[in-house]
Image: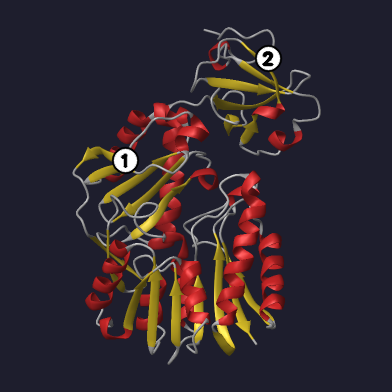
Amino acid sequence: MTAAMDVETGLPEEAVLKLPEVILKPRNALPFFNHHPWVYQGAVQQVIGEAAPGAEVLLRSDKGQFIARGLFNPFSNIRVRLYSWNETLPLDEALWSSRLDDAIALRRALHGEFTPDLACRLVNSEGDLLSGLTIDRYGDWLLVQLTSLALYERKDLFLKLLQEKLQPKGIWLRTEKGIRAAEGLEVADGLLAGEPPPRPLFISENGIRFGLDVAEGQKTGFFLDQRENRLFFSQFVRGAKVLDMFSYTGGFALNALVHGGAREVVAVDVSESALQLARSNADLNGVGDRLKTLKSDGFKALEGIAATDERFDAVILDPPKMARHRAGVDAALRGYLSLNQLAMNVIKPGGWLLTCSCSGHVDQGMFLEVLGRAAIQAGRHLQFLAVRGPSSDHPRSAHCLESDYLKCVMCRVV
């Protein structure tokens, strides 16, 4: 029996759903033909049909040419997130399942068989063609962030697929600051399936044991994107006195102590609970006697140290995101300028600076330029030794350069 054909497309009728259509303004289609996944409100000319929040839609150029399939959100500045550039490939369970399989296969290729103490990024949103979905694996638990209203509406399907593929002991939802304003999404942290994660939950990174609070800590409990940078930095600090700013639970500090052989690390963070975990982690790895902690705002701590004679062989700057929107870039650049100038003021001549930005709206060129200006204002000469990104289990999309958020610059300060 021959399948009925759609007269407009020449495709089988069952492959061409009568979906709502989002029509772009003239001269706005090129990024999306090139597989950029975010269609901003300003690029949309009109919506044809009833497009409910979270609905699947077809994206077309102003001339009616098919571009992609996506999910619609009338409450977000990202009006459509795109997932399929094949007109016959609907956004159904088979597609989501295939995307998860591919993401999991990459992590198995990188890390080998998943073990009870392995922590890794399992799904990295745009980098895994799953814009709005981030999943971190901590041993037998999955920590999920849904930053898309449309994917949140499909969370039960994703939970089913994750349980079938990975059999986790539990799945816990973590929310991101500003998600209500960005997506119109009302959501709170909590257990989605199985058992809640233990507190602390223990993992191993670079052979170091860490106890984490994945239920309430920053992000999903640990900054997994810095795994390779922590180990890289440790090679510069043998016998050094190190200042670890925004230290959180001691990721950089413990790598410097355990692998680097640093003489002493002073870890500074505004969170006493994070510092307590850092001290516990240092004791757990037998280096507690070489870790000192200071509860303080980062800028105030650097200003206070600069006013004394204390100087360090190496400084780590890994501050929180400073720009959540394009409108915040100028303020973020001023913050990075001040922070890095203060850091250079407390580094001995010939010492090391590892400085980071996780603000996606601040690109690499902007960040490097700010570092040069900070050096001039500090009266120092700055040498760039390496410019690095996130760990390899955080792939970035070649079609969405905004997803290349982390800049990690290893410097020598003369």
Q: How is the image coloured?
A: secondary structure
- Find residue 364 and report its horizontal and vertical position in percent: 66, 61
Q: Residues within 10 Å of mark 1 (few under 14, many from 20)?
A: some
- Identify which residue, 77 or 33, lies in the foreground: 77
Query: Residue 338 appears in which quarter of the rendering?
Result: bottom right
- Identify which residue, 253 or 91, lies in the foreground: 253
The structure residue drawn at horizontal position 49% and vertical position 20%, both measured from the top left corner, is: 53
User: Can you see residue 397?
Assistant: no
Q: What residue is disc 1 on?
A: 189
Q: What residue is disc 2 on?
A: 9
Horizontal side of 279 relative to 48 (left or right) equals left
- Pick whichever of labels 1 and 2 is earlier in the sequence: 2
CA gap, disc 1 and disc 2? 44 Å
- Find residue 401 and report its horizontal and vertical position in percent: 65, 49
The structure residue drawn at horizontal position 31% and vertical position 47%, both measured from the top left corner, is: 142
Q: What amino acid type should be assigned to the residue bearing mark 2?
A: Thr
Q: Secondary structure at mark 2?
A: loop
Horizontal side of 29 relative to 21 (left or right) equals right
